[in-house]
Amino acid sequence: MPILGPVSVEEATVSDVARAVKPVWLEHPETARKTLVLLGQFFNWAMAGEEFRKNKANPVNWKLIALINGKARQQGGHRGAVDWQQIPDLFAVLHQRKGTAARALMYAILTNVRIENAIGLRWGAVDFEKGVVRYLASEMKVKSNGDFTACLSAQTVQLLKAQAEENEVFGRNGGGYVFPSGTKKGAHITNAFLEQTMKRICMEQRLVDRQETKRAGAPVYPTPHGTARASFLTWVVDNKKDKAAAELNLHHKLKTKIEDAYDRADYMEDRRRLTQEWADFCFSKIQH
């Protein structure tokens, strides 16, 4: 809706799909891309067994859509991130706000996981006794890198326990999500809500990605993803921390076989140490 809504699945054409994504084609190419991926999957399903679409031509034809709508704007640059020197300032604000969105953002930044892994976290994956969170390879963006174990700092453990208490008070334990939606029962908080929360805080605190703002010629506000990962890695590099441990904390694969073998042997302690150092820095402006 409103463009594809009245069009029958059988009669939908490339032109129909092109018109549907045209409003976001030039200015928001990533949104258009995600929409086309979902539409393509839908039409593949509709054609399976000829149940809903006997026409075997999938109307999501990327090349033809590009010809119809024109060349999409190249986004360039990277996702905005908070300068690592300002991370303690961000945490001071998040700590004051509390709430599910604030804690989800803090969790993502403290553990350096992608936002999808933060908002989709379930209590069954959290092991307080061992201080880790376990993710299956199927839950990770780069599945070929295998299962992932995120280390929990002392501050992250406290944060998760505070969230558990809040979930209990408000009766939000449906679905087993650590960061449940406040409006939809049995669902987790959304990426969009975290993006909005982050942008609102950054606008209020005048936190911008200075490098990307200079490149774009306009304010580029930090994103949860960029801050959780790029800010952390920049902090590691600038402060000469353990780069290999940092790469593993980001669920990246180490470059050499020797490093890979070392990872399997005993890199967990190095990762734990780095995670705690990062948390101590993040909380450095919060009085305990």
Image (spheres, rainbow, N blue to C red):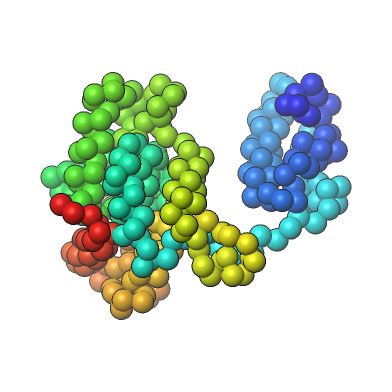
Quadrant housing the N terminus: top right
Question: Which percent across, then down, holds residue 227?
Answer: 42, 58
In the image, is 165 to the left or to the right of 65? left
Q: Residue drawn 56% across and 59% down?
A: 220
Q: Residue drawn 33% across and 41% down?
A: 97
Question: Which percent across, then down, holds residue 173?
Answer: 29, 25
Q: Residue drawn 76% across and 41% down?
A: 23
Question: Which percent across, then down, holds residue 49?
Answer: 69, 25
Q: Is residue 260 visible?
A: no
Nearest the eye: 2 or 125: 2
User: How many marks can you see?
Assistant: 0
Residue 196 vertical placement versus 251 (above, below): above
Q: Residue drawn 15% across and 52% down?
A: 288
Judged from this view, the residue extending furthest toward the left is 129
Q: Is residue 274 visible?
A: yes
Nearest the eye: 129 or 221: 221
